[in-house]
Image (spheres, helix red, strand yellow):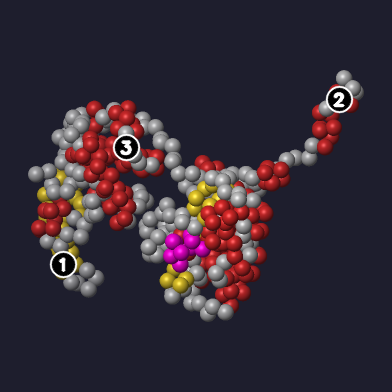
Amino acid sequence: MDYHVFRKKKIDKKKNVFYRWYYYYYDNNGKKIQKACPKCKNRSDSESYIRTLPPLAAPGAINENLLLKQIAEKMYIPGSEHVDRRRQLGKSTALETLTESRGYIERIIKEWGDYALKDIDSEDVITHLLKIKRSGSWKNRYITILKEIYTEAPRYGCKTRTPDFPTFARNSKKADIFTSAELAALFKPANFPDIQFFLLFLLSLSGGLRLGEARAIRRKQILFEKKVLIVDGFCKRNGDRTVYNKTGTPENPKLRAVWIPDFTLSLLFNYLQGAALDPEDFIFSIAGKPIRQDTAEVVFIRALINAGIAYTRKQLIESGTWKTGHVVKKTGIIPGGRKLVPHSLRFTYISRMRLNLSARDLQVMTGHTTEAMVEYYNQKDIDSLIKTLPPADTALETLLEFRASGS
C-alpha cells in the first residue's frame, strides 16, 4: 500500500479535544509527506479515500506504458485530489461541471482506456471524432478533457508529451449585430409585454451583458451615483443564481464592473422608484423569481416581430415575400439568414464599444478571458465602417485627376 492513514489529536480554542484523519506516503526522494483526508470522519472513510489516490511510482521511475484509464478513472470525482487541485488552480469544481466532464471521461475511457498514453496518436483521435455526429464545440470539449488527462500523467510517473490536436470549427452560426435603425425600431416599450422586459434587454445592450447576467441582477448591483453596474453572478437556465460569473468559480468569481449610459440609468431609476425592492431582490422577476431564460427568449423574438425586424412564417407567406431566412426557435424568421437573438445585444455592444476602446480595455468590461474573444465578438455594420473613415476629400480629388485632364 502506497498510502497509510492515521489520526491526530487536536485541541481547539476552548480546550476541546477532537481528532482529524490524515494519510502519509514517501515521495521519490524518500521524504515523508503528510496530508489531510478531506471530509473523512473515521478510519473507514479515510481508507476509502486513499483508494481513490493514484499509485505512486517507484523513486526515479518513468512509467512509459501507463494506460489512459489508470489516470482518467480518478479524475473529476468529487472529493478527489484532482478536484482539489482544480479548485486551487481556480478552475471550476461545480457539481454540474464535474458531472459533465465525467461523462466525457467515461466515454474517453471506453474508447481509449486500454491504450498507453504514448501510443495515442492525435491523427487517430481526430479521425475517430470526424466519424461522430456531434457539434464542433462538443468535439473541442472532448479534446480539452483528453488534454487534461495528459497533464495528470506526470503525477503517475509518466512524462509523455501531449499530442497536438487541431480545433474543430464551430457548427453553430455566430450571432449577428443590430444596425442603428434596428435598435431604434426595437427599443420601444410597446414592443414588449411590460416595462421590465424592455429594461431587461435595454440593460443587456447598455452593459454588454449575457442574458443570464441580466436576469440575475439584484437591486444592490446598480450604483446609480457612480453610473456603474457590478456583475457578480448569473442565472442558469433553470433559474438558479450563482455567486460567480460565467468563467469564474466560487473561489475565483471573476467579478467585473461596467459603465451604464445615463439614458438607461434614468429609466431604471424611475422604474425602481415605484418597485420598493430590497438590496437582495431581483430587479427583473416573475413571482419573486428571476425571469426564466425560455420566457425571455420568446419575448425577445416577439419584440423583433413587433418591430418589423423578424416575421412569422404566416406574415411572410401572406405578404408574398417568403424567402429562406434564419429560423428562430418556434416563433420567428429573420430575413437574409441573419441570426438575431438576445446574445446579439452583447455582440452589438462589443462591436460598437470597440470603435473607441482597445480590445484590452474592453476586455475588463466584457469579462472575456482573452483579447482574442473580444475580437471574436467584434463585428462591423456598414454605418459603423463609414464612421471610422478618416477625412479624405483632398486625396479623393487627386485620385482621378487623369479623367479631368481628358487622358
Q: Nearer the viewer, mark 3 or mark 1?
A: 3
Marks 2 and 3, Cα distance to the nearest angstrom?
A: 60 Å
In space, the residues marked 1 and 2 are separated at their CA atoms by: 96 Å
Q: Give how far across and how far down residue 132 sits, in percent.
A: 32, 37
Mark 3 lies on residue = 132
Q: Which residue is mark 2?
A: 403
Quarter where residue 293 is shown: bottom left
Could you tell me which residue is drawn at 43 percent across and 65 percent down? 292
Q: Viewer-proximal residue, 33 or 405?
A: 405
Tell me which segment is drawn in magenta.
291-299
Q: Which badge, 1 or 2, comes first in the chain's sequence?
A: 1
Q: Which quarter of the rendering shows the N terminus?
A: top left
Q: Is residue 101 left or right of residue 237?
A: left
Query: 264 or 199, which lies in front?
Result: 199
Instruction: Determine whether the residue tagged by mark 1 lies in a helix, strand or loop.
Output: strand
Mark closer to the chain start, 3 or 1: 1
At label 2, counting other C-alpha atoms closer than 10 Å, the crowd grade (few under 14, some 14-19, many 20 or more) is few
Place of residue 183 in the rendered image (x, y in percent of width and height, measured from the top left):
63, 57
Q: Which residue is mark 1?
A: 18
